Amino acid sequence: MVPSFVWCLLPACGEACLLAEQAAAAGHERLDALLTALTIFVLAMWVGFEVITKVPATLHTPLTSGSNAVSGITVVGALVAVGAVASTAATTLGFLATILATVNVVGGFLVTHRMLSMFRRKE
Amino acid sequence: MDPALRIALIKLAYLVSAVLFIGTFRLLARPRTAILGNLLGALGMVLAVGATLCHPDVQRYTWAGVGVAIGGGIGAALALRVPLTAMPQMVALLNGFGGAASLLVAAAELYQAMARGHAYRAWDQPVVAAAVSGMIGAVTFWGSLVAFLKLQEWLFRRPVHYQAQHVVNAVLGAIALVLAIWLASRPDALAAYWLLVLAASVLGVLLTIPIGGADMPVVICLLNSYSGLAAAGTGFVIDNNALIISGSLVGASGIILCQIMCKAMNRSLTNVLFGVFTAQLDEGLAERVYAGKVKGASAEEVALLFESAQNVVIVPGYGLAVAQAQHALHELANVLEARGIRVTYGIHPVAGRMPGHMNVLLAEANVPYEQMKEMDEINPYFPQTDVVLVIGANDVVNPLARTDPSSPIAGMPILNVDQARTVVVVKRSLSPGFAGIPNPLFAADNTLMFFGDGKQAVLELISAVKQL
């Protein structure tokens, strides 16, 4: 169990390590903001573990498609990028990101709903 | 309204939607509350998007509107049209889109910083995070695309292996790391970002092409997790807690599913990703196992077995999805239940091409979820089972996993169907499953083989039982 867990966490650790590396260079205020963000990241991850462990195997496919929809939250960043008056490049990238993220949000929630409404009890 | 107050309110809205997302996953703990959970999630997303549109930085709405309309249209069309047998492909595609969207948003932020005229300093949080989310996003997008093509059986139908693939992957990983450090120390070097994305894209393709069909559930979960982590990374880029929280929830979900799948195959994730799973095609072994011991049965003989049974367990595998036999199977279960026979379904965690694949197929065919039993729940029940009907499953019911320590599936938890009084296996031929090994179950004294296409075979069984 331990090795598989480590492999899964690798990108998360990378994220944390790389972010921490800049700590030396950054001033106190920046360090503070970084630590706040890291705290939120770690705690949210933990809440995720606690809550999702309780999802039964029967619902693992809707869980996966539902989490697709939730990861479509990137749409929030995409909308800021496309809506801000900054650069054409940023607008274009934001526009593409908006399309992809909205496919995730709409497709994910709809298909999850479609699947979940098929799960029924015995009459 | 004062911009500072407005931003504070927007952040508050993000907090509420994060809580709603946590509620979504919480309510998925029971089939009865799951629909409400999903609706809460959608509500949270609407809230987050609505709040974002009120952000002072958002001044133009045309392109945002067009993007949402196009994406929403594609998403709705996909969601409403995709057949449930194709759910693994759908999820693979959505994983990829999530990763790509995150890497694009991270890139957009780098361009915006340049345009605003105050470029980031070396090793600033947003730049480092952009490198991370660009890398994970690209691996996720291309890996998912390859997974999609494999599942859809358009390309890479067989695992692709080549000389020194681990060396090539390690070199690519090292190149990506160097490019990430270059970008972090020179935040205005946008070329570094795109080269990083390119290297990670190639890596994503090369990491996924060697993976075989039965290992797909693990890969889907891993990519699901990465799509969440990419979103969280982008949250660090644009300093947005909604992205960080939602991304880590999804990251955690993928990791948990990954662990469950690996455990159900008794393999480590390292082994699934990098171990070359060579199917040992030993003709002689198959000959020794099966020679003269396999008993075929007709539909009438199987129907007679059912007649004297009090309880039947149906064990479905990926073959059920391929044959699209789920509706016929449920009808057979109805016919049996009408004769007073108790019918349940025993489902192995890695049956199918993604976690929970069989459950969704059976739910589509109106099988009540109380009848679907997990492996640990059903295994103690097999010794008291009169008839087990195995349809489209092979390796997950192979007793060699318990008895032969040298077998490639040694130690894998299986459904102990061989302990039942009689086993009926619906299968086209004696061809091996993914592991490439013969299955002594097919030659066991208490096993009858019912050869044929899954759906056709079940239909024949239905009419045979009705004629009793």
Image: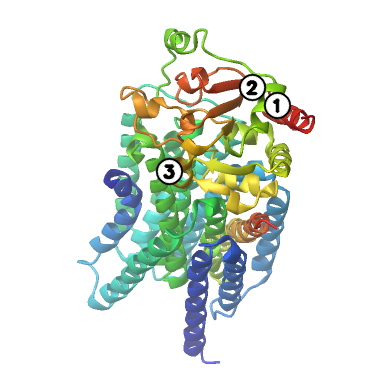
Closer to the chain start, of discs 2 and 3, is 3
Classify residue B183 by image quadrant. bottom left
Measuring from the top left, give residue B184's x and y in whole percent: 32, 57
* Marks 1/3: CA–CA distance: 30 Å
Q: Residues within 10 Å of mark 2 (few under 14, many from 20)?
A: many
The residue carrying mark 3 is: B261
Mark 2 and mark 3: span between their CA atoms? 30 Å
What is the chain letter for disc 3? Answer: B
At 26% across and 73% down in the image, what residue appears? Answer: A31
**Total numbered labels placed on residues in the image:** 3
Counting from the top left corner in percent of width and height, residue B71 is at 66, 58
Q: Is residue B337 left or right of residue B258?
A: right
Camera-nearest residue between B298 and B56: B298
Disc 1 is placed on an element classified as helix
In the picture as drawn, the residue positioned furthest to the front comes out as B308
Tell me the distance, in whole angstroms, between the alpha carbons under discs 1 and 2: 8 Å
Please name the residue shown 39% across and 41% down the image.
Answer: B262
The chain letter for the residue carrying disc 2 is: B
Residue located beneath label 1 in the image: B457
Name the amino acid type tagged 3.
Met
SS under mark 2 = strand
Task: Identify the mark at residue B450; answer none if there is no mark.
Answer: 2
Q: Residue at x 54, y 22 (%)?
A: B447
Q: Chain of mark 1?
A: B
Evaluate if marks 1 and 2 touch, with contact meaning CB atoms under 8 Å apart. yes
Give the mark toward the camera: 2 or 3: 2
In the rendered structure, the answer to whether residue B114 lies left or right of residue B35 reads left
